[in-house]
Amino acid sequence: MRKMLEDKLRRYEELERQMTDPDVLSDSSRIASAAREHGSLSKLAHKIRRFQKVLDEIRESNSMLASGDSELKELAESALPDLRIEREKLWDELLDMTIGGEDANRTRCVMEIRAGTGGEEAALFAGDLMRMYKKHAETKGWKAEILESNLTELGGFKEVVMAFEGEGVFRELAYESGGHRVQRVPETEAKGRVHTSAATVAVLPEPEDVEIDLKPDDYRKDFFCASGPGGQHVNKTASACRLTHYETGIVVDMQDERSQHKNLAKALRLLKSRVYEHFRQKEHDKRALERKTLIGSGDRSQRIRTYNFPENRLTDHRIGLTLYKLDQIISGNLEPVTAALIEYDRQQLRGDMDGME
């Protein structure tokens, strides 16, 4: 936790330097990106600086206590209680701002929802999850956009990729990464038997351009005719786009738009997120033993939650949370779940303050 805060402060100071660099100032896209990231880190950086100052003052007061000087000792004894209260207050505020990992303060992210085992019922469940997150975004005042989707005949989704933008968006949605299991009677089930199917969710932070600068030489670009609905346009125009990143082998296909230019822009946006996540996950794996909790780890193979419709029950297996109001949650009232997950992580991290004197 403390290392992460130090890294964030270093990044903020590096952005401050960039914003006075003539090379950056002469590039409108670089300065805009740097200014956006600088702004998103500003509140956290100032809080970290204040916290570090309070720690320095506590250490100085402890030195005064050990000095043997009666006047200094009296001065330190009067100052320490207030300093310790402020330290705890600032630490709690920093926890609130950083829960969710190093990317907690990002205001943009990409969510990929894929149908798993269960055939058409799994695809319908993926659609239910998509609508749940979209409705939750509306209640939070976030912007939600579908980047890519693959519909089934019954209106489900084999895959849907969404982009979200708003205050605290990644901190909340990062907890949704993993396997989601549904238990219910499918509409196609004549005998009324409960079936189990699944979908996976992956939430990726959307990096700034200054963090991951993909050059045309870093990937191969292919255009082809879109498949699926679309009439004559599908057969005549090579508007669909495929990008292949050479170093990681990551491939992105995009064909939702009729415009080649728009598909390319969306594909680049998604490729940047996936490449950034690839290297982020490698770093995460190196530090995995240091983590106190798996919450928000982004492991797609981990079954994190069960949605039981007959019992109107949602269970989050990571923290043992069970709520009997699935109808409200699936309609977009996700707040009770996200709040419980954030609080659990908060309590796990709070112990990192031990030994700070």
Image (cartoon, grey):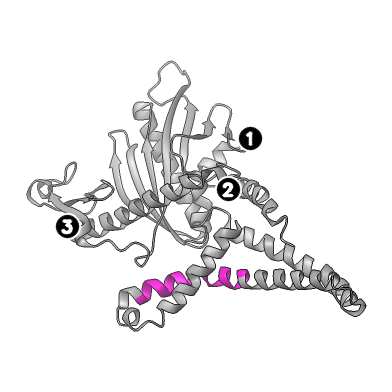
Q: Residue 34: name its quadrant.
A: bottom left
Which quarter shows the N terminus?
A: bottom right
On the image, numbered disc 3 is attached to which residue? Answer: 260
The correct choice, above or below, for 84 with respect to 149 in the image is: below
Type of amino acid under label 1: Gly
User: Would residue 192 be counted in the magenta stretch?
Assistant: no
Near mark 2 (Cα within 10 A), the count class, few <14, some 14-19 or many ≥20, is some
| Residue 56 screen position, x and y as percent | 70, 72
Type of amino acid under label 2: Thr
On the image, numbered disc 2 is attached to which residue? Answer: 338
Which is closer to the viewer, label 1 or label 2? 1
Marks 2 and 3, Cα distance to the nearest angstrom?
Answer: 38 Å
Element on which disc 1 rests: loop
On the image, numbered disc 1 is attached to which residue? Answer: 320
Image check: 357 left or right of 330? right
Element on which disc 3 rests: helix
| Residue 324 screen position, x and y as percent | 62, 34
Type of amino acid under label 3: Gln
Among numbered discs 3 and 1, the one appearing first in the sequence: 3
Q: Which residues fall within the magenta stretch?
A: 31-48
| Residue 271 screen position, x and y as percent | 29, 53
Which quarter shows the C terminus?
A: bottom right
